[in-house]
Image (tube, coloured by chain):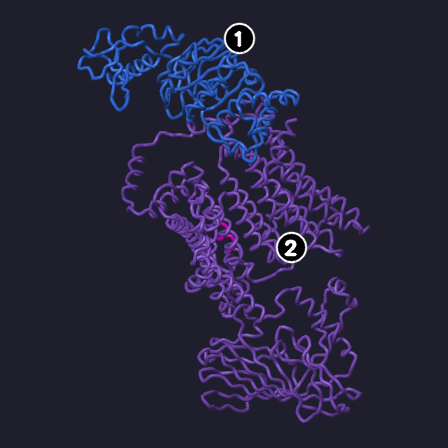
Chain colours: A purple, B blue
Amino acid sequence: MLINNELRYAYRQPIVWVVTIAVSLLNTLIGLGSLHELSTLNELYQVYALLQMLIMPAAFAVIAVTLLFRDSTSNMMVLIDVTPVSFRVRWRTRVFVSTAILSFPMLFGFVVVCGVFASQTTWLMGLQSFFLISLFGIVQSSFLLILIAFYLVKRSCTPFTLYAISAAEGIVYIVIGGILGFQFLSGSAIVSEVFYTFMLWADPFGITPLLDINVSDQASNVPFIVNRIVYFIVGVLVFLALSKVSINLNVEHNNKKAVKPAQEKTRRHVYKRLPDLPVVHLLFLNFKVLLSSKLTPVILVIWASIVLNEALSTLLSAQAHNLNNSITALNAVAWDVYLLFTSVCLALWSGLVCWHTQRNQFADVLSSTPISNWQKIMADMITLLICLLVLTVVMGVASLMAELIAGSDISLLHYVQQIIFSLVPQALLAVIFVCIHHIAKSVIKAGLCIFALLIIKFTPITSALGITHLLWNIAGSPLQPASQTKLFLESEQVFLPFMLFWSLVAATLCVFAVKLSHRGAGYVMNKKIWTMPAVAMALLTLGAGSVMHIQITNEKPLTYQKQRMQWQADYEQTFRHFADLPQPTMTELDTKIAFYPEQGKAYFDVQYTLENTSEYPISQFLVSRDGNHTNWSLTLINREGEIKPPKLNQYEIRLAKPLEVGQSLNLKVSLMLKQVMFWPSSEHLIIKPKWSQIAAQSILPMVGYQPEFEIQDPLERANKGLIAEPSQTGVPVKAMLRTTLSTQLKHESQAPGVMVKQWQEDGRKFYQYQTSQPIELDVVWQSEPRIILHE
Amino acid sequence: MLVLTDINKQYPDGTHALKQINLELHKGMVGLLGPNGAGKSTLMRTLACLQAPDQGDYAFLGKSCLQDPSMLRKQLGYVPQHFGVYPNMSCEALLTHIAVLKGLSAKQYKKQIPELLALTNLTSVAKRHVSTFSGGMKQRFGIAQALLGEPKLLIMDEPTSGLDPAERERLHDVLVEISADKLIILSTHIVEDIENLCHHVAMLIEGQIIDSNDVETLIAPLNNKIWLCDTLPTSHAQVLSKSYKYGKPSWRIYSEQQPTANARLQLAKLEDRYFLELHKKEARHANK
């Protein structure tokens, strides 16, 4: 009856339904999206581990606060404690029900995935063991997590502590997974065999022994079995110990210590010194709340340790390749750990800062004062920005320490650059979080919204749903880590446009937040939302977003993976017959390239000499180019023929008179290349004042059917209705190459072959290169400022 | 029915909340009267088995509550001074939830809940979320949940605080109706409530029971010694309280003789005894 009572309470809470449904759906979608008929059992376990590490901490936080912290958050402790149900019985029921509710949605996804693949009879035994492992893995992990929440309730901790611990658990596990070689985490490797062996036996959630690549049959996986049994016993013992003594309700009196006179004097002193500005006092209040939490220094210490550990281990590994420098050190932390850790901290701290007045039941009093919405929002934003700055400085200092220990080559300039590139996006994220907290009328709604943003930003969910887009990286940009030779050169152009866009989004949210802020009390005064500034900002943001989307798509027409796959399938289905037809061979290329690095453009005029080296006359041939590079044209020279309008970016040419064996014809191709502004440049195509490089094979049209454009993955080929085996790639094409390069006066250029001539004309420098024999076309053309070349 | 013996309670911050409390309480409505910070809530929480005293014991129907708190909880209804409610729970659902925790069977609570809703005039809002209730409705809900299981001991800590006069009157009606066969301990600083409802009163000041008796006995020492004056007397007569009528002040004075020429003799009230004890406490502090 008590269990029914508990379940009835739980399922009256909408948030429990939301978590149950959302987590079940997420698990199912990600599971089905990540796996296919040919997946191995090990890949199945990896998906299980990934979901447990990513989703379970968040689900646990919400369920635990709703079900286990409810007496304190709803101020019902007294009413419940006077009932005759003993403490032990009550908490046994709550722990049991909470574990069941947390396990159910996690298990649901796996049951569905198991069901989908159970038709594979060779899998049946493995699936049975997988299901059992999920049961002991998931149910047991849920039990352990619920025990942590129970302990926190007994210690009279606030929900914030639980949120922080669950976030830390998620992050720490991801970091640990990275150094334990979890295959689904990119860049992960076993850093220490000793630590790996330790975790095989001691991993509280049993993930490490489950993913052990040395184990073929889980039924004989001794570390896993022992691990689960030991943790089950430990869990039961801990539960029995925790449920022995009831919670002391007189928390306030018991925790109150006599204030020392010196402390009291200091407190009065600080208040007296503050300027009489509302924002300053609000800031002071915010920092008091943050600093009074015991978790804040713990978070900073943990963060410094993570950075030091990551940077140092990477630097020591890089010593062998002579790459221990600031770039290596900062790349180890700034692009994944920093983003994730600071995002989670900002999410937690924003909740703490924006809702503390309500938590202390002081919101009505504060919101009735004359402080404006803007002042309150500013104070909250400044608080978070300072916290972010602290985290970033800690990252910098810890990384420097790691470099000093490793004796690496320190570049402070790189630190400055990296800090700017790291800090700005996260600052925008902090602003967005504060706005959400001010607009949403309850902390739960705000939390869910922020959680959804973090899921979209950090998980592959949009890919799984087939809606990949650069703008899903909320407040981020596709800026790439610095390379050892070129630093940020290849992708720095994307930073400004994306940051401007997200700044506009943040500013628009600020306008709405000022209008709609509930000032901490949960009530909205202003019903008139759509004023001129709000409408203007909203339209501007929508417009900017549309322009960004169009530009992103124009620069890379095959933006999405699915689009690319479809183009490849269409290419094969439309043009594969050309593979069986004789095609002319390129023998000579006369390339005229005009570099305009300041404008980010390069113009190509390429004259192809094509010879019929086959045994048959050629009446039609195909000129192929990658679907992402549009905007090109071709003409036949001294030859009559029909050039069909391009289809899928390919040109079909039908000759009026067939090209006989041994005969040649000339084809002229004109194309323009532009530096991408919204995508990181690849090393094959970059046109910038500091450095320009174009790789022939990535941009030049090629004659004949190109097997490289086909889909290679057998499952995808089957999905698209293509024949099982892709075409064999042919022999690489070789041709004589003559290049006439022009660039700006301050640059020097390089091309394949020997330079035969250089001159100046019309304010530009010209170079002519010639190869002495036919070469493969994996060549590059470059243009760089003169001073770099001389160095 | 309820016997308290040498109850002492001191908090870690040095507050000595209860000092040698000895009381013997019988069926009916008993008032616990004292100013803010007197220790009333501490005593209520102790009696409700929410916290253990440092020393002493208390027995209900002859059985020690410290040794077997669950025995008392099965017969206890408690309305704390401040309490919250679970979100997203209707009045009926939350009463059911608490009824189950109190060990009532489905048959029992399905009978009792409608009766209690009717008694506390909450039938029309039975399906509404309790978190949307007004202050008065929430207090009535508090009483309804306390009466689940037909408790023999009802502890009510400041039940009328924050209620408007109409709600207070409604609450009084409910309390009188249910007090026939129960011990109801009513803790409040509103003297009028105690005087109107309770037959027995214990006065608690600074953690000590100053006096515990029926109302008439408590008032008796003040008979024929309470005066109402329109001007403040200059003599050493004890001023008990000051009040206003149509903006004009008047003073209630404790004096053996007529303190001023215009002083009028009044019937002693419990409030007079209460203020007299408060003044005695202030005098003790002044002498220290």
Instruction: Tell me if residue A249 comes above or below residue A358 in the rendering.
Output: above
Among all residues in the image, which is located at the extreme bottom?
A: A638
Q: Is residue A309 magenta?
A: yes
Using the image as rendered, state which of residue A749 and residue A208 is in the foreground: A749
The picture places residue A389, in percent across and down from the top left corner, at 42, 54
Residue at the spot 47% in from the left edge and 75% down from the top edge: A690
- Identify the chain of the residue marked 1, using the numbered disc in the image: B
Can residue A325 be seen? Answer: no
Question: Which quarter of the figure has residue A68?
Answer: top right
Q: Which mark is residue B62?
A: 1
Range drawn in magenta: A305-310
Mark 2 surroundings within 10 Å by alpha-carbon count, few (fewer than 14), some (14 through 19), many (20 or more): some
Q: Is residue A541 above or below residue A350?
A: below
- Which secondary structure, mark 1? loop
Residue A386 part of the magenta-drawn span: no
Q: Secondary structure at mark 2?
A: loop
- Tell me, yes or no, if residue B185 can be seen here: yes
Q: Position of residue A420 (x, y in %)?
A: 44, 61
Q: Position of residue A407 (x, y in %)?
A: 46, 60
Q: Quadrant of the C terminus of chain B?
A: top left
**Count of residue discs:** 2
Which amino acid does the dot numbered 1 rest on?
A: Gly
Residue carrying label 2: A183
Residue visible at 56% across and 45% down?
A169
Instruction: Tell me the CA gap for discs 2 and 1.
Output: 69 Å
> Which picture quadrant has residue A777?
bottom right
Labels 2, 1: front one: 1
Residue at (34% x, 8% y) in the render: B219
Q: Position of residue A580 (x, y in %)?
A: 79, 79
What amino acid is labelled 2 in the image? Gln
Closer to the camera in the image, B33 or A34: B33
